[in-house]
Image (tube, rainbow, N blue to C red):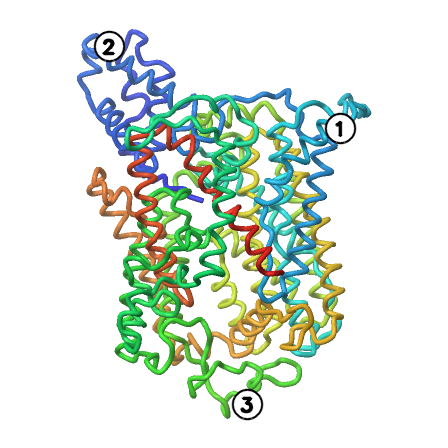
Amino acid sequence: MTTEKMPEDKDEIKSKESIEPLGDGIVDENLDLLVSIYKMHARDPNSPMEIIEWIEQFLANEEISSNPEKYERTIEEMKIQAVIITSNSPYAEVRAVVDNHDDPTLPVSTIRAWVIGIFFSCCISFINAFFDIRLPGTWVEAAVPQLLAYPLGKLCERILPDKGFTLSGVRHSLNPGPFNKKEHMLITIMSNISDGVPYTNHIIWIQFLPEFFHQEWASNGLSTNLIGYGMAGLCRRFLVYPSYCVWPSSLVTIAMNSAFHDTSAETSRVLGPFKSTWKMSRLRLFAWAFGLMFVYFWFPDYIFGGMTFFSWMSWISPENGHLARITGSYSGLGLNPLPTLDWNLVTGGSERDPLVLPFFSIFNYFIGSLLSAFVILGIYYTNTFNTAYLPMNSNAPFDHFGKRYDVKAVIDERGIFDGKKYAAYSPPFLSAATAVVYMFFFAVYSATITYGFLYHRHEIMLEEANAEGEGTNDLNRLDVHNWLMAAYKEVPEWWYMVTLVVAVALGMAGIAQYPTETTPFVVLYGIALCLLFVVTLNVIAEFIGGVWVEGNAVAMCFFKCYGNVTCAHALSFTRDLKLAHYLKIPQRFTFWAQMVPTLASTFISIAVLQYQVGIPKVCTDDAPFRFKCPRINTFFTAAVFWGTVGPRKIFGMGGPYAVTLVGIPIGCMVVAIFYFLSKKWPKNAVLRNAHPVVMMRGGLTWSPRTLAYVWPGVPVAAFSWLYLKKRFLPFWSKYNYRLKTLPEGEYFGPRIGEFS
């Protein structure tokens, strides 16, 4: 998600009253909108700079007030511009895939949509839960049921009779007509909800099995899969309604949906690069891209693995360890101009896709990654923290022999920290890259709070005031999608709050009933942490939990669970609310399309878990069906490292890595510096496109990833966003997001290869 609006202070923006003296009725509602548009997008790097400067010059021209007749044409042009911006999204990437109109007569919550949606929800939940412990793993993403739902929906349209029943004045038919895009998206939302394994499953694994803590009372969990809903309801005002809150991943989902349903522009010709003309339909492009990627996958994964990590520079001198550490794409830093020939790495492992995220975001992330690479080199080659004796870029903890840290060597039979064993064994040591990653984690958290206060404090206070008065932010009324969604009944916030209260009660009761050695108030701690950050909180949740219940790994896991999962679920559910917002799906249908699949998928995941924990030798090297539990073992290591050993011994006063906490003040200072520089030079293009939080987020690239996951996306993003979008906007609008579906063809290749 990107929320890049950087507004001016109120006293620096010309108010409505200051331009009303234009007189004679010339300043009307459209010009009022113009002032609001400037307030909203003046510092937005996603907004065209030339339009913002044009509006700014118009508002700053005092002569217009005294001589409006002279500027009559300019005034009319600005009126037209205001209408254009408010009648559609101000962002080309949104306009490319989202309609600025709605057909409220389309059936949405149909019997076939619910049957298909629940079916895929249960299937995804079963497959992902069953293969979560397999090595190599198999994972079904929500894009797969989105792809398969279309032929199923069309089949229902063809074979089912138009028979049904009437309930509360609404007829529910087996076949209400053509399978439409709103039904399709409702199914996709149900699938999105179910594509993850409940976080408590990982805790149950390490509690139950004798290979870990052997606490057989641990058997199920429900609370964490519901607890994010209440937060999602609170986040709507900040992350769904404002037009400047663009969720790029949602645009890709909508693009695939429209490729199946929107045929209005399929026959139109668009001008492309090199004087070419394109008329290929978006569905045909998707089919070609899908097929090509299915074939291409076999080359980097099975025929020539060197295509993925193309470390050609280290091949020049294979015995040169320094060259391998600096340029190696696999275990080095990946400082290589051509580090990969694998499209999956070009897209940053689907996390930083250059066709989805705007160029300024990709480039800011790259700058942060590049700068942090030199910090890693400095730490390693000065042997700071004794890192020169360890691999430079590894996420594993080590002992003082340079071997992987054996967490079981410092705990007793109950899984509690044993000080004597710890003293006899070794403190943990981190690689240079891991130490830098932790420093940047601390910087990102402090920078996020500082950024929110400096750049968005006015909007936050305005939304809070409107929430108390049950009003709507006037700036949000500028968004055409808000106008269209106003035709449907909103979900009352008390629905979300009841869900939150039930989830909290379940969580607190479960923790209190069983011998978890954890306070039930950990659930409230997770909610408070989410309210403060609303970003992924994995490290800080581990850090605080480890300090609070030092020596108890299981208790720390519950702190991590509620501290991290609450926020992750809130963002995930909010993303789906934005999907429904763009597709004009009634809000109450979306609520139930999230709630029902969550309950169904949770019970299926629990049932799968209950079966798997009884498999002999599961989670061992001799496990059947390759059920070796790589993720569970990693989770157990992190639990003991953070919970049993505890962050005090690592990051506390006198700890070997206490200096990494310097990231906290650095994060605050960097954001403040960029803020005041942008206030002094508001028209500077570099400062307008610089995002300090994203830049520091780039420092989290490492351990074990490398620059090979980041740099290849920069030229692709530049070509897409700076060249194609600016010079061939119709071509870019028609095809860019459809090309993002390339990895969906790649998805089916590994599923065949893994079981061949």
Q: Residues within 10 Å of mark 2 (few under 14, many from 20)?
A: few
Residue 353, horizontal then vertical, whole percent:
42, 47
> Which of 517 and 288 lies nearest the eye of the viewer?
288
**Residue 673 falls left or right of residue 412:** left
Amino acid of disc 3: Lys
For label 1, the crowd category at 10 Å Cα-Cα, with few meaning under 14, some 14 to 19 and many 20 or more, is: few
Mark 3, residue position: 421
Seen from the viewer's position, the closer of residues 712 and 239 is 712
**Which circle, 2 or 1, is nearer the viewer?**
1
Give the vertical position of 72 relative to 201 (above or below).
above
**Quadrant of res 315:** bottom left
Q: Residues within 10 Å of mark 3 (few under 14, many from 20)?
A: some
Q: Amino acid at mark 1?
A: Ile
Q: Is residue 725 left or right of residue 192?
A: left
| SS state under label 2 | helix
| Tag shown at residue 159 | 1
Are dots 2 and 1 in contact, CB under 8 Å?
Answer: no
Q: Secondary structure at mark 3?
A: helix
| Label 1 – label 3 distance at C-alpha | 69 Å
Look at label 2 and name its amino acid.
Glu
Which label sits in the foreground, 1 or 3? 1
Q: Element type at marker 1?
A: helix
| Position above or below: 272 against 722 | above
In three-dimensional space, the C-alpha distance between marks 3 and 2, rounded to whole angstroms, equals 84 Å
At a point 36% along the width and 55% down the height, the residue shown is 710
Q: Are marks 1 and 3 in contact (CB under 8 Å)?
A: no
- Give the number of the disc on residue 377: none
Which residue corresponds to the image point at 63% horizontal and 44% vertical from the top-left? 191
Question: Where does label 2 land, which residue?
Answer: 72
Q: Earlier in the sequence, mark 2 or mark 1?
A: 2
Dot placed on the residue nearer the N-terminal end, 1 or 3: 1
